[in-house]
Amino acid sequence: MHLQRFCSVDVLPRVPTKAGALGRWSTLALIATLASVMGAVGAPRNVLIASPDGRLSLTVMTTGGELEYRVTFDKATVIETSRLGIVIDGINLGHGVELGQVEHEEANETYAWRGVHSVAVDRYDGAKISCKSSGGGDFTVEVRAFNDGVAFRFIVPRDSTARVPDAAISFVLPPESTVWYYGLSHHYEGVYKKRNIADAPAGDWAAPPVTFQLPGGAGYASITEAALVNYSGMALQADGHNGFQERLGDEEPLSYDFLHVHRDAVEVGKRLSKPAAINGTIVTPWRVVLVGQDLNTLVNADVIQDLNPPPDKDLFPEGFNTTWLKPGRSVWRFMDGGGIALEDMKEFSRQAGELGFEYNLGEHWQRWSDAQIRELVDYSNRYNVRIMFWLHSQELMDPVKRRSTFERLHDLGVAGVKVDFVDNEAKELIDFYNSCLRDAAELELVVIFHGADKPTGESRTWPNELTREAIYGLEQATMPAWAEHNTTLPFTRFLAGPADYTPVIFGDRRRDTSWAHQIATAGVFTSPLMVYAANPKNILQNPAVGMIKSMPSVWDQTVVLPMSRIGEIAAFARRSGDTWFLAILNGPQTRDMRVGLSFLGKGRYQAMLVEDVQDNPAAVKIQQATVGAENSVKISLRPSGGFIARFSR
């Protein structure tokens, strides 16, 4: 009788073949499904989805009618059994739940990408799980398991009235996990703290991504969200019991004046207390947990962009290769001196051309006539430099004015805009991001968002978004210890996507870091539009100018070397075409090391090495050598120092 009931199940979760498994059905999935269909009184019902390589699994279950989930990697727990739910108009659909039909889905494809690598992989096994809640009707939980992460979201069918969704998901970390996070008081411009999860105080706010190291060397994970559309953004709040609770953004965007005059005095809880109403079907953003044995897996994970739709072929006929979508490097006068007159901007463009940079980012353009803007654009084009202009978001909130402004800039030959002060995750501002990107795409303008929310993979759908801030970068002049911060960021904030950190400066603003450290940040940090902080004159006068000129802003391949440790050292090998770069950021400790060059291909390479000068942080030592994959380089890193090398075939 039980066997007959088992055979009559409509759909079983499919997982790939592993040693000891029966065909494409894993033993664990069979056991979980048997528990659900054999009908033991009070027994939980489980739906397990495993990654294509079988190492990572996401289980959705009901225990006493409560909807829950857990995540495991190999034999280790990544997320302990945690609440899974969504509140609609005050009713938590995660209570009194019965699981229904399970519809399997899968994908295995690649697509063009930019930043960490040039080809992204979208490969997963997944399911749509039909659910019935005793208090709120039917809904669907959609889950996907990739080789480097898991994701889940809710789909609540259309209703005749607008409804207000709210948060009800928890993320319980294994005991003794080490976690890195910062709060919300500066809206994605904070400094990460390292804590044992048991020491995270109840009520502490955490801005995703929240990265943690599993106990016992079991690997790393990071919590964030993807495909944030028509919804409020997600924040996290510590519960004091090894977990974080999902929270949603405010319904009312705070005014610019309030945010920037009273920003530090804002009571964050009030900003997160009014999720916005949604008409029609409610589709939440994906909740994402990136998972990997090492930091290289996290940095190379494509999960976040995979969960976003591909670009519109009408707007981007060749996808990321559409002709006007040009990544590159930019000069900017704001941080290291430079005038704001038209002639000053023209000189910045000339110097950008001398560096081989592709952009010049300017402000105060509103005081110029159309004729003057055309003069700057035409002059810059002679040096193969494109012009971008800074804009305050308040100038673009009105759709008619936004369209008019974009049309004017397009007609004058301006390549793009930097939109600043969009720093709130209210649904209305999330809608603004998407509307702004659509209008810009229709007029072939590339976009930087500054003073912004974390990225959630939008640049797959809108490849005209080249980068966004949402990071504590060099614009801040008060950081006492940049080196620890810089060796934390590649494994925390940068996991969400590119960041407009504005790296590389040689004056006092670099604080504890060396020149070599500053130059290496452009090799470790990811931003398809890399805006340099230093005045181009100071770059041209630096002994390592040849290295800086040769560094691209997008990469074909990235390898995070095993020596990397969050907050201590970040070591990246990155390839562009046939040329490799080795970039290392050092934390506060002196280090002597030998780094193997096995990442190089066959043949011999001409190497340019830029190293610290041990007794002078405002200097570099440059060496040349001929090497191959069988060789290694000996490196001595001063505290807060760095190293960068180029290997040309």
Image (cartoon, helix red, strand yellow):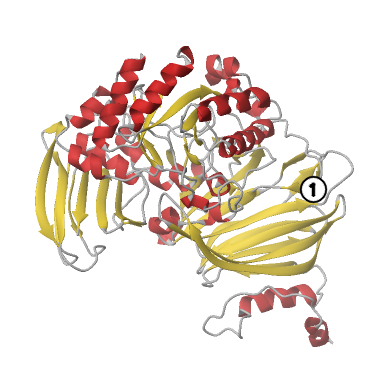
Front-most of 328 and 561?
A: 328
Q: Which residue is mark 1?
A: 281
Q: Position of residue 573 (x, y in %)?
A: 29, 55
Q: Secondary structure at mark 1?
A: loop
Q: Give above or below for 194 relative to 186.
A: below
Q: Residue at x 27, y 25 (%)?
A: 535
- Quadrant containing the C terminus is bottom left
Q: Position of residue 412 (x, y in %)?
A: 48, 26
Whether residue 296 sits left or right of residue 309 in the image: it is left
Front-most of 567 and 226?
A: 226
Q: Position of residue 638 (x, y in %)?
A: 18, 40
Q: Is residue 191 visible?
A: yes
Q: Position of residue 15 (x, y in %)?
A: 61, 74
Q: Is residue 589 visible?
A: no
Quick one: which residue is furthest to the right in this view?
160
The quarter of the picture where residue 122 lies is bottom right
Number of numbered discs on residues: 1
Q: Residue at x 56, y 44 (%)?
A: 462
Q: Amino acid at mark 1?
A: Thr
Q: Residue at x 22, y 46 (%)?
A: 644
Front-most of 222 and 532?
A: 532
Q: Residue at x 58, y 66 (%)?
A: 124
Front-most of 516 and 97?
A: 516
Whether residue 291 sits left or right of residue 331 in the image: it is right
Whether residue 39 sits left or right of residue 490 in the image: it is right
- Quadrant containing the N terminus is bottom right
The quarter of the picture where residue 427 lies is top right
Q: Give above or below for 171 relative to 277.
A: below
**Local crowd at mark 1 within 10 Å, few (<14), some, or many (≥20)?**
some
Q: Give above or below for 569 relative to 131.
A: above
